Image: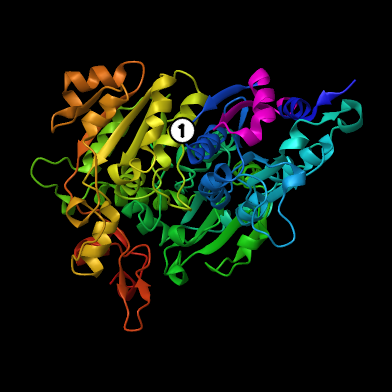
Amino acid sequence: MTTKYSELLVGWLKELGYTHCFFVAGGNIMHLLDGVRREMVCIPTVHEVAAGIATEYFNETEPQGRAFALVTAGPGLTNIVTALAGAYLESRELLVIGGQVKASDLADGGIRQRGIQEVDGVALAAPVCVAAQRFETPAPRAEIERLIRLGREGRPGPVFLEFCLDVQGAPVDPAALGVAGRTAVAIDPVGADIASQLEASSRPVLLIGGGVSRADAEAALPDLRRLGVPVMTTWNGIDRIAADEDIWQGRPNTWGMRFANVLLQQADVVVALGTRLGLQQTGFNWQQFAPQAKLVQVEIDPHELAKGHPRVDVPVAADAGATLRLLARNAKPEPQWAKWREFCDQVRELLPLVEEVNAPGEGSIDPFEFTLALSLMADKDDLVIPCSSGGAFTVAMQTWMQKAGQRIVTDKGLASMGYGLSGAIGAAIAFPGQRTIHLEGDGGFAQNLQEMATVRVNSLPIKTFLFANDGYASIRMTQRNYFDGHYLGCDTSSGLGSPDWPKLFESFGVPAITLGSDWATSEPFLKLFAAPGPAAFIVPIDPEQTYFPKISSRVTDSGSMESNPLHMMTPDLSSELATKVLPHMTKEDRA
C-alpha cells in the first residue's frame, strides 16, 4: 500500500509532538495543507511573518504541544524571513515548512526562474537557520527527524524544510521511509566548581538568562532562597523568578533597571547562566562590564564563550538550566553575604523605577508609571507580551514587576517593529482562554496591524495597550539627541502617516477606549480589561516623552560612538547619592 508523502510527513510531525500549524495558504503547499488540516489545529494568519512570529511565541511559552509554520513558495518564504532571523538571534525553536515548485520546474543553467513563484528558499533562509534543506525526492523519517532535532538540541534555532510540490503529492511506501531516528542526547551539567567560586565571594550575583527554562528555574528556587544570593535576570529570562522574591534584584541592561546596573557593577563574582552576554546586556562599553567581578559564564554555545566580549574568567560550556539546579543544591550560604544583601535592598530603596526626569506633557500619560501600575494590576496567570523595540518595550523591561506564574515573552535580538501583536496571538493560542496583555507602540503596531483580523476571528482574549505617540518614539529621540531635532520619517509632521486608532479597531470589531489619567479606577477600563475576548486601550503618550534612565553615548571626532559603562546611566546621579549607592567603586569610577 502507498500513502501520499505529505500525509506521511504530517504523521511524523504529530508523533514528534506538533499539534498546531500557523499558515498562509498557497498553491505550492496544497498537499501539505490538506494533510495538516486532518491532524492539527490550523491557525491561518493574514501575513506569513505573523505566522512565523506566532509560532515562535507559541513554543516559547512552553505549552503541552508544539507549533510549526507552513508557507508557500516565493513570497511566502520571503515574507517569513524576518521571523526566522528573530528566532535565530534569540536561539529559539522555529520549524518552518515551505513549498516549492515541482522538481522538474526548478531553475538551472544560470536562469533566475523557471517555475511560477520560484525563488531559492534555502539560499534565503540558510543564513538565519541552524538547518535549511530542499527535498526534490521523498526523504526518510530519520532524515526529517535529524534536521528537526538540530533546531531543538544544544543551542536551539530555526529549521527550514522546503518540499517540491511533486514530492508532497508523491505516493510512497510508509514502511520503506518510516524508520524513526535516535532520541535526544543530554548535555551534562556542571556545578561543583562554580559553587566554590560563589562561596569565596563577598558580593555575589547570579544572572539568569533565557537559556534557563522556566522548569529549571522553578526547581532551583527553593535552594536559591536558602542560599540568599541576589538573583538578576536578562530580558529573556524575565519570568524565571518573581519580582516579590526577596532574592530578586532586577534586570541589568543598557536600558536596564538602574539599581540592578549599579549592583551588578559592584559584584565581586557574577555567575551568568544561559545568557550570551551580548552588547545590549553588557553595554557597548563591555570592557567595563562587571569590572570588579570574576565572571563565570555558563553557555551552551562555545562560540559565545570565545567571542572575546566581555572578558570571561571562567567559561563553562554546559546546559545552563541543569547547572543552575546543581549549583543551587551544592552551594553553601556564607555569612559574609548578609551585609551584601542588606546593601542591595538599600540601593533598591534609593533608586526607584520611575524617575522624575520623565515628566509627561499635558494630557499625556507617563509610560513608566502606567506600565508599573499595570504590572501590579495584572494577574499571576496572565500572559504578557511586550513588543520588541522602541519606548513601549524598554519601559516595560524597566518597570514591569513580574508575578510567579506569568509567562512573559519578547524578542529583542532583531529588535524588529511589529512583533508584539503576532507574538500575542501565538501565546494566546498556546494557552486558550488566558488573558494576554500586549504592549506595543503605535509605530510598531502599524507594521502588523492586519493581524487584528486573526485576533477577532479567533476571539482571542488579547488586551492591546497601544502607546500612541504619533510614530517612532525611539527614532525621534535619536534624531533629537544626535541631530539637533531635525526629524525625518518619525511622525506625522515629518512624513509618517498614522491611522485614527479608535476607528481602526472598530473596523475590526474590537472594542477600544482611550485612557485618561484616572484609567486605573475607571469603570469602563476595568470592565473591558476583565471581560472575555479582545480589547484595545489607547495610551496617549507625549511625542516628546523622554525615556530615562539609559546608557548614553556620544559621537566621537572620528564619527564612531563611545558609551558609558552600565552604572553610569543618564541622568547622572548626584555626587551624594552616587557615594551612597556606589561605595565599592573608586571616586573616578563613580564620576
Mark 1 neighbour density, 10 Å: few (under 14) some (14–19) many (20 or more): some
Residue at the limit of the structure toward the left, as seen here? 362
* Residue 408 locus on image (x, y percent): 45, 36
Residue at the limit of the structure toward the bottom, as seen here? 557
The correct choice, above or below, for 405 with respect to 192 in the image is above
**On the rendered image, what quadrant is the C terminus found in?**
bottom left
Foreground residue among 191 and 161? 161
Magenta stretch: give its range: 14-39
* Residue 525 locus on image (x, y percent): 22, 23
Residue 399 lies in the magenta-colored region? no
Amino acid type indicated by mark 1:
Val
Residue 34 lies in the magenta-colored region? yes
Applied colour scheme: rainbow
* Residue 227 locus on image (x, y percent): 52, 43
In the displayed structure image, the side of residue 188 where residue 589 appears, left or right: left
Tell me the quarter of the picture where residue 67 sits: top right
Which residue lies under the disc numbered 1? 46
Residue 559 in view here: yes
Tell me the quarter of the picture where residue 329 sits: top right
Residue at the (23%, 66%) spot, across then down: 481
Number of disc labels: 1
Tell me the quarter of the picture where residue 549 sits: bottom left
Residue 460 in view here: no
The correct choice, above or below, for 381 with respect to 557 in the image is above
Label 1 secondary element = loop
Residue at the (65%, 36%) spot, across then down: 28
Foreground residue among 547 and 212? 547
Foreground residue among 169 and 483? 169
